[in-house]
Amino acid sequence: MSDIDTPQEIFESNCSTNSEPFALQNLGNFMEPEFSENCIVIIDPGMQIHNRAYAIVRYEGDMYFRQYLERGHKRFLVCLNAQHDDIELIGEYEVVGCVVQQKQRKQKPLHYYHLNRITKEMDFTVSGKIKEK
């Protein structure tokens, strides 16, 4: 039997520390309907967090997959599923990375950042979109 018992221990033991994107499985219904339970999300640890980004954040010893929201000078981790409470970020927290893509069984991957052909900047969308060719 493995000495790793919790999702946080698995996350910490299997992820590299260089800024390479990595995959995680979404557990729970906290982020439904946009992210279904057991979908795979691709995290980019080099992506800067911004208002409304989907992010993996370490706070008070726990790891959260939530939407990051700024309301005035306050910062929150928000579940898309209204059955769960928001978390106000007070004090220190660590942004592990932002979700750049998700993949659900038998569906095309959805991307949350797209190259704007006019400005050449990466545009964020709250609802994932299939990548244009």
Image (cartoon, helix red, strand yellow):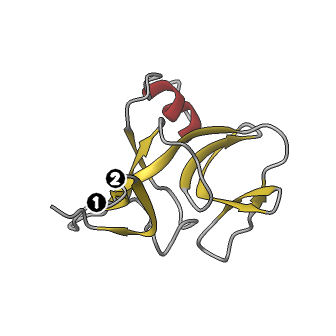
Q: Is residue 13 above or below residue 56?
A: above
The image position of residue 31, as x and y in percent, is: 54, 66
Could you say which is closer to the camera, residue 57 or residue 114? 114
State the residue at coordinates (69%, 70%): 84
Name the residue tied to disc 2.
120
Helix, strand or loop for disc 1: loop
Task: Work out which residue is located at the far front of the displayed protein and give it.
Answer: 118
Q: Is disc 1 surrounded by few (<14), some (14 to 19) or many (20+) residues within 10 Å?
A: few
Name the residue tied to disc 1.
117
The CA distance from mark 2 to mark 1 is 5 Å
Type of amino acid at the residue the image marks with label 2: Lys
Residue 13 falls left or right of residue 115 = right
The image position of residue 106, as x and y in percent, is: 20, 67
Q: Is residue 132 above or below residue 50?
A: below
State the residue at coordinates (34%, 58%): 114
State the residue at coordinates (59%, 62%): 52
Could you say which is closer to the camera, residue 14 or residue 72? 72
Q: Is residue 52 above or below residue 22?
A: below
Q: Is disc 2 surrounded by few (<14), some (14 to 19) or many (20+) residues within 10 Å?
A: few
The image position of residue 109, as x and y in percent, is: 26, 61
State the residue at coordinates (74%, 64%): 86
> Looking at the image, can residue 10 be seen?
yes
Type of amino acid at the residue the image marks with label 1: Arg
Q: Is residue 15 above or below residue 56?
A: above
> Looking at the image, can residue 2 be seen?
no
